[in-house]
Image (cartoon, rainbow, N blue to C red):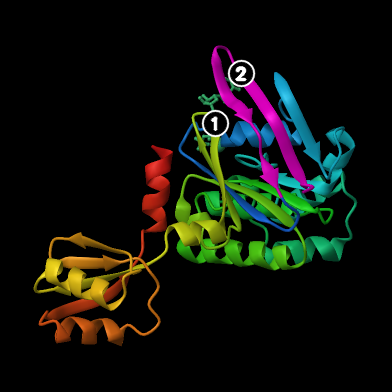
Amino acid sequence: MEYIIETKNLLKRYGAKAAVNNVSLHVEKGEIYGLIGKNGAGKTTLMKLLLGLANPNSGEISLFGSNTPNEKRRKIGSLIEEPALYKGETALENLRRFAILVPTPEEELHRLLELVGLADVGDKKAGRFSLGMRQRLGLAIAMLGDPEILILDEPINGLDPAGIKEIRDIILELNQKGVTFLISSHLLDELGRIATKFGIMTDGILAEEISAKELKEKCRAFLKVTVSDSQKAQQALLAWRSDLKTEISGNEVHITSRVEDTSEIVITLVNAGVRVYEMRNESIELEDFFIERLG
Ligand SMILES: Nc1ncnc2c1ncn2[C@@H]1O[C@H](COP(=O)(O)OP(=O)(O)OP(=O)(O)O)[C@@H](O)[C@H]1O
Ligand SMILES: [Mg+2]
């Protein structure tokens, strides 16, 4: 497998502390990779290393399959922490300044402002922008020059729910056009709905990489059946289908095997003289999965 972003045993120390500790990251082309970790986990530091904004103590970085990443970084757009804006200038004037590095036609600048929802802020100077507006402008700056990869550090920090949805939609739209994303967050909500893969960082270590598909499988639903007598219910179910995977929890039977026609469960139980009070699908909350791992 060739990765569009790959690191091998990347290490970055600040004094005695390893902010990024032997991280081997694997991002495939076309992915929306969500880097999740608590404050201080090392997410920003890892991104800075990828972008060449900080130098690793050891380890390797490969971008677009190249081990000499410097020349490849032009194809990466980024928004790291707060964008450094010219406070006395408008959104458009700011964008023009950053476009000096990546020459861009004026109409494209307008299109970008439109895309991030800043087309109507007019003459307002960036110094008077809200946090959400600064984030939006930062995103527009990151998108200058049609990057193939966007590295976004907590891009929806400070946005209201409507803004979060807008940014999420922009990310999905660009992703459809082939842009690969690496997005950090300490909030699962931000990423849970769009990420195709998750990297879980704790204390500098990339503890786990898991695809959204694998995650769904791990959080798979079980059927919770609340009954009058769970022992008797379990026996009846196993007599009906000996391969059924069941667990008892109080007056509930949890069935983890897949059952096509769940009405057969009810019939089996009622025939065995067990009353069925409730039957519903349960799943481990995504949130619980991460909380357990983030420590
Ligand atoms: N320039 C620096 N000098 C010294 N220590 C640093 C520096 N940058 C980061 N660190 C330390 O490295 C660790 C990781 O920090 P980092 O900012 O990468 O975490 P993060 O996951 O981005 O956190 P947050 O969610 O708060 O943004 C922290 O302990 C931090 O104090
Ligand atoms: Mg950070």
Secondary structure beneath disc 1? strand
Identify which residue, 243 or 293, lies in the foreground.
243
By secondary structure, the bulk of the magenta-drawn segment is best described as strand
Q: Which residue lies at the image location 53% right of the left edge and 66% below the top edge?
A: 165
Identify which residue, 75 or 86, lies in the foreground.
75
Q: Is residue 74 left or right of residue 54?
A: right
User: Where residue 199 appears, x then y in whole percent?
Assistant: 57, 44
For marks 1 and 2, give the one nearer the viewer: 1
Q: Amino acid at mark 1?
A: Ile
Q: Quadrant of ligand 1?
A: top right
Residue 13's label in the rendered image is 2
User: Where residue 223 appears, x then y in whole percent?
Assistant: 31, 71
Number of residues whose C-alpha sits closer than 10 Å to that of mark 1, classed few (under 14), some (14–19) or many (20 or more): many
Q: Is residue 111 left or right of residue 291?
A: right
Secondary structure beneath disc 2? strand
Identify which residue, 255 or 111, lies in the foreground.
255
Q: Is residue 229 left or right of residue 124?
A: left
Q: Which residues are magenta?
A: 1-27
Q: Earlier in the sequence, mark 1 or mark 2?
A: 2
Task: Tell me: residue 141, above or below residue 205.
Answer: below
- Residue assigned mark 1: 205
User: Where residue 112 appears, x then y in whole percent?
Assistant: 75, 62
- The answer for how far apart the CA atoms under marks 1 and 2 are is 12 Å
As drawn, which residue projects farthest toward the top?
16
User: Where residue 32 appears, x then y in whole percent?
Assistant: 65, 56
Q: Which residue lies at the image location 71% right of the left edge and 20% below the top edge?
A: 58
Q: Which residue lies at the image location 19% right of the left edge and 75% below the top edge?
A: 236
Number of residues whose C-alpha sits closer than 10 Å to that of mark 2, classed few (under 14), some (14–19) or many (20 or more): some
